[in-house]
Image (cartoon, rainbow, N blue to C red):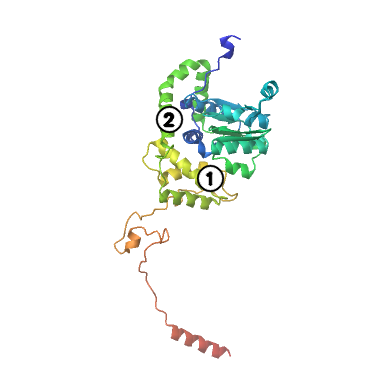
Amino acid sequence: MSPVDTELPPLFPFAAIAGQPALRQALLLAAVDPRIGGVLVEGPRGTAKSTAARALAELIPAAPFVTLPLGASLEHVAGTLDLQQALAGHAVRFAPGLLARADGGVLYVDEINLLPDALVDVLLDAAASGVNVVERDGISHRHAARFVLVGTMNPEEGALRPQLLDRLGLCVRLANVADLAARQAIVRGRLQFEADPTAFRARYASEQAALAERLGAARARVQGPDALPWSDAVLQAAAALSVQAQVDGLRADLVLLRAARAWAAWQGDADVTPAHVQAVAELALVHRRKPGVPPPAAAPATAPQVEPPQARSGDSPAQRHGDAGADWGALPPEPVGTVRLAVPELLAANARAAAKKA
């Protein structure tokens, strides 16, 4: 086979993806911290789902991009007994699957809603833990499988069960681009890329390099014992948003915290704040929110302030310093006008009226 036959086509650069800011943000967050649990991208055909996933892998050094075919078996994905080795040498050896190949990179699953539930369970377990465990066919084997899971689906073709939806870290719901100027810009960029991929990629080379460097720095900041910590205010913000969305369980809180830390690391901020939680809230809650519960119209008391912004002169010391025992949002008492009612006279008048009717 000639080198031309094995050469991969050039990738559309991540820096050139336009018109999908939420998609870019979700993919970058998952790349910063794969423990978030992957990204589910819902949307109609032709909304750059696969293009963005492939482009993300290029930002991670030496990252493999592995595509899971729709008809893949559980053994093909998780790995199984190497039959050839077993028959030839009477040895039990493990044959790695797609999860092992995807370690350190991106695992792309198109039409994830059409996969068997058992297969999705294996994917989600490995994506959340970073480890794939295989115990069958006389094999007990575990290996690293820390990858960014990107699953895409068209809602018109079916939905995932709520139990599986909840286990996917972030979710982006794309819509067709209706703005004429935005559509023209996207199409123009795609045509320029197809006409001369090398020149198009060269135009975004410096921006691509900056994104890759920034991603590497952010990934380093969320790992190890020196990872950015969460304050009580951040924990409270995540809890308030989860309660407001009426989510089941505590997975939403954990995803919110990890995503907020990843966003703070991506922004280069020194601390995780409630504002970071608010910035990633919809990505973590849109697929977990109970049906019928509307999303917040504005930033909902997301970041319950431990300390009031301004202390009034008449506040008690506990109110001025944000006493943890006080109800958040409670206001100090203020004088209001009162009206004195002539209760005895009113009762007497009612009695006289009743006597006349009798």
- Mark found first going from the N terminus, 2 or 1: 2
Where's the N terminus, which quadrant?
top right
Seen from the viewer's position, the closer of residues 54 and 190 is: 54
- Residues at marks 2 and 1 touching, judged by CB atoms closer than 8 Å: no
Q: In the image, 192: left or right of 123?
A: left
Residue matched to label 1: 285
Farthest front residue? 90
- Provide residue 138's location: percent of width, then percent of height: 67, 33
- Provide residue 315's location: percent of width, then percent of height: 32, 63
Distance from label 2 to label 1 (Cα)?
A: 27 Å
Q: In the image, 215: left or right of 125?
A: left
Question: Is residue 106 placed above or below 286 in the rendered structure?
Answer: above
Q: Secondary structure at mark 1?
A: helix
Residue at 43 percent across and 31 percent down: it is 215
Residue at 56 percent across and 32 percent down: it is 143
Question: Is residue 321 placed above or below 197 in the rendered structure?
Answer: below
- Number of other residues with Cα within 10 Å of mark 1, as a class: few under 14, some 14 to 19, many 20 or more: many
Seen from the viewer's position, the closer of residues 124 and 30 is: 124
Residue 39 in view (yes/no): no
Q: Secondary structure at mark 2?
A: helix
Residue at 44 percent across and 83 percent down: it is 343
- Provide residue 230's location: percent of width, then percent of height: 42, 46
Residue matched to label 2: 216
Q: In the image, 357: left or right of 328?
A: right
- Provide residue 202's location: percent of width, then percent of height: 44, 18
| Type of amino acid at the residue the image marks with label 2 | Gly
Where's the C terminus, which quadrant?
bottom right
Seen from the viewer's position, the closer of residues 121 and 322 is: 121
| Type of amino acid at the residue the image marks with label 1 | Leu
Q: In the image, 128: left or right of 90?
A: left
Q: Quadrant of residue 95?
A: top right
